[in-house]
Image (cartoon, rainbow, N blue to C red):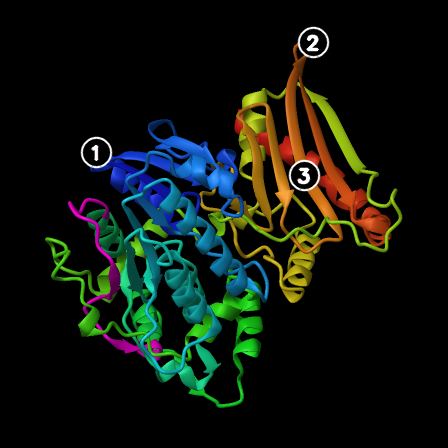
Amino acid sequence: MKRVLITGASGYVGGRLVKELLEDGLNVRVMVRDSRKISSQPWFNQVETATASAESPEQLDKALAGIDTAYYLIHSINTGDNFDITEARIAKNFAEAAHRQNVKQIIYLGGIANDAHISKHLKSRMQTGVSLASTSVPVMEIRAGIIIGSGSASFEMLRHLTHRLPIMTTPKWVVNRTQPIAIRDVLWYLTQAGELEKPVSGIFDIGGPEVLTYEAMMQSFAKISGLRKRWIIKIPVLTPALSSLWIGFVTPVPSSIAKPLVNSLISEVVADPKRSIDAIIPKPPQGLIHLATAIELALSKISTHEVETRWSDAASTTAPWAKAQSDPEWAGDKSYIDRREAMTDIPITAIWTAIERIGGERGWYGSNFLWSLRGLLDRALGGAGLRRGRRDPDHLHVGEALDFWRVEEFIPNQKLRLYAEMILPGKAWLQFELSEVEGKSHVVQQAIFLPRGLGGQLYWYSVAPFHALVFPIMLKNILQEAEKLSK
């Protein structure tokens, strides 16, 4: 049986590809930096997990040992301004490790880059392909344009812009042509590539059956969603930087991710017939999915809370808690805790249900104005804000994004630990623990903060008055909701 490795298994495409390859009967190993992030996936017990960083040659060697085909789905788009340097370096590391371990085939999902004017983001995608092909291991580079599917960053960005803005001013790129492709078709090509009998080297473009402008695509979103035609006013002075800031406020996609995506819109993203993949992999048996159908499928998954993976599943790679070099040795070593607890006759199962429903459209059990204000501040600083929401209104799993938090630990009826991905001068968690004490339910709610230097300590003291207002109300309202649920 062919052994395949999937990198980026906790990401949008990788998480879905694992399921497809398992259904096709392949032996799958996944490479992730933190196995907890995929521990709640339905396929977790069907795969071998390799915990590794693409920065470590030794860990890569172990992850690639005995592998026939390796899928490279690592993307460093949100690692800062030097993401292109990072991507080239880790791709080179991966290629060299694959060569040492006698991997027969690397399959890489990149981006279509046939226009004379391409962004830094697309140049980086191209360079990643070059780095991967720097050894004798055959590399099949499959390039796609905008992927239409529930949970993709591009889809969420365009959907929210269309839904929330009946009148919008846009840069001139709105008339550029693009060739979107449904996530189902992307997965078709990736799975078929992994099952080829012989290794293949080369660059291949894949796209959907329609070529249209970004403006036409947004109008399609509006029509399918039952909205009136959008008024789109094109102006030349709206730069990509300003556009990404605006997108950061209007959509769930933060400016740090929106910026490289918007920059890519200066290019026409249309598949080159000379790079057709048809001679190697035929089109899906049912044909390529049209844009309208792809949008309808994606919207139906969102409305029924059946989104398998989201762009926000990928971990935040920033490390704002690192000490500043000028700080004294003791700075940042202290942790601050706001602890609230209660004893109640309400069953633990009801309390847990109420806790698991926190965030998203339901809010944070009181003081929602303050939470919204903190979310707006975070967006202004380039953070995630509250608009990422949550995948499902009732259920959580480890690794999933929850507004500007991420689920770090999840033990049903016992413990929920959320890690803060907002812009902070330190490292923060919100934690709930449940236990039974002398026949009663004991609830412990804690906000934990590890400051970064002196600035972090000042931050904690400045927000302490708000904590005194927010957190007692939160615990009180959780218990009130739990009492309703228990009845």
Which amino acid, mark 3?
Answer: Leu
Q: Where residue 175 appears, x then y in whole percent?
A: 35, 84
User: Which numbered disc covers residue 438?
Assistant: 2
Expressed as whole percent of the image width and height from the top left, the position of residue 362 reads 55, 46
Q: Is residue 54 above or below residue 383?
A: above
Give the secondary structure at mark 3.
strand
Where 115 falls versus 470 (above or below)?
below
* Residue holding disc 1: 25
Give left or right: position of 426 versus 130.
Answer: right
Q: Residues within 10 Å of mark 3 (few under 14, many from 20)?
A: many
Which mark sits nearer the N-terminus, 3 or 2?
A: 3
Q: Is residue 110 left or right of residue 212?
A: right
| Residue 369: numbered disc | none
Question: Mark 2 packing: few (<14 Cα in 10 Å), some, or many (20+)?
Answer: few
Mark 1 Cα within 10 Å, few/some/many (few <14, many 20+)?
few
Residue at the extreme top: 438
Q: How far apart in space, not on screen, are marks 3 and 2 (Cα)?
A: 26 Å
Q: In the rendered image, which quarter is residue 354 located in?
A: top right
Mark 3 sits on what residue?
Answer: 430
Q: Which dot, 1 or 2, sits closer to the camera?
A: 1
Name which residue type carries label 2: Glu
Q: Magenta region: which residues?
A: 194-216
Residue 159 position in % (x across, y down): 40, 65
Residue at disc 2, secondary structure? loop
Give the Cα separation between the discs numbered 1 and 2: 51 Å
